[in-house]
Image (tube, rainbow, N blue to C red):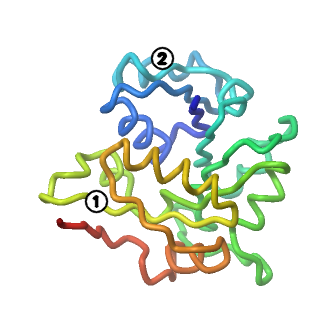
Amino acid sequence: MSIGIIGSGSIGSAFARALARENIEATIANSRGPESLQDLVREIGPSINAGTVQQAASADIVLIAVNWTKLPQALAGLPNWEGRIVIDANNAIEAPAFKPFDLKGRASSEVVGDLVPGSRLVKALNHLPAQIVSSDPKAEGGKRVLFYSGDDASAKADVAALFEQLGFFALDLGSLAVGGQMAGFPGGPLAIHNFVKFG
């Protein structure tokens, strides 16, 4: 499956580094255009290419990791997602205040889902700091746990398989409504914790 990354900040770059460690190809994009990413892709490695947001969004699996207030602009004008998988790595919070946005009782993935119509959404990679995502998942002697949740079983299976290919232990938290609450930051009981599976 082809992989795209929309957002070249800390989480998007960390995911790209995790992919590059296993020589998995991906296209990374940001709002400033491919030229602004040349130094980053040179640093990360040859399996990661810079592209436009449209190119990244056309992949089979697309990670979205953008500042919360910039999500609507980042995803505006993209065509229907036609059943492609979107990994929602966003939390409804933003530096420097880190004050949660009032979503009027909605889960953050519900808001993101409205911005990517036709996609199969999987919530993941929003519960760990970027430096942990990009570091060796077996550094502690086991496998670092990556949580994921979603309402589409086949999409979750594809994301779990990708995480396992990267060396992580993928752990299903169930539906978006349940898993999103458990791993969301801030407030989720599983957020920020670096769990490792042994054996």
* Residue located beneath label 2 in the image: 38
| 181 and 84: which is toward the camera | 84
Compared to 188, does 116 lie above or below?
Answer: above
Q: Residue visible at 59% across and 58% down?
A: 90
In the figure, 194 relative to 177: above or below? above
Q: Nearer the viewer, mark 2 or mark 1?
A: 1
Q: If the image is split into quadrants, where does the N terminus sit?
A: top right
Q: Secondary structure at mark 1?
A: strand
Hey, what amino acid is under mark 1? Arg
Percent across and percent down for residue 33 are: 65, 22
Q: Residue at x 51, y 82 (%)?
A: 187
Q: Name the residue located 53 percent from the left edge and 37 percent from the top edge.
A: 8
In the rendered view, would you say 72 is above or below 2? below
Q: Tell which circle, 2 or 1, labels the residue nearer the N-terminal end.
A: 2
Residue that label 1 marks? 144
Image quadrant holding the C terminus, namely bottom left
Is the residue under label 1 in contact with that under label 2 (CB below 8 Å)? no
Q: Which residue is drawn at the image coordinates 53% and 50% (left, top)?
A: 159
Query: Would residue 15 appear left or right of 56 to someone viewing this image?
Result: left
Viewer-proximal residue, 125 or 178? 178
Q: Residues within 10 Å of mark 2 (few under 14, many from 20)?
A: few
**Amino acid identity at mark 2:** Gln
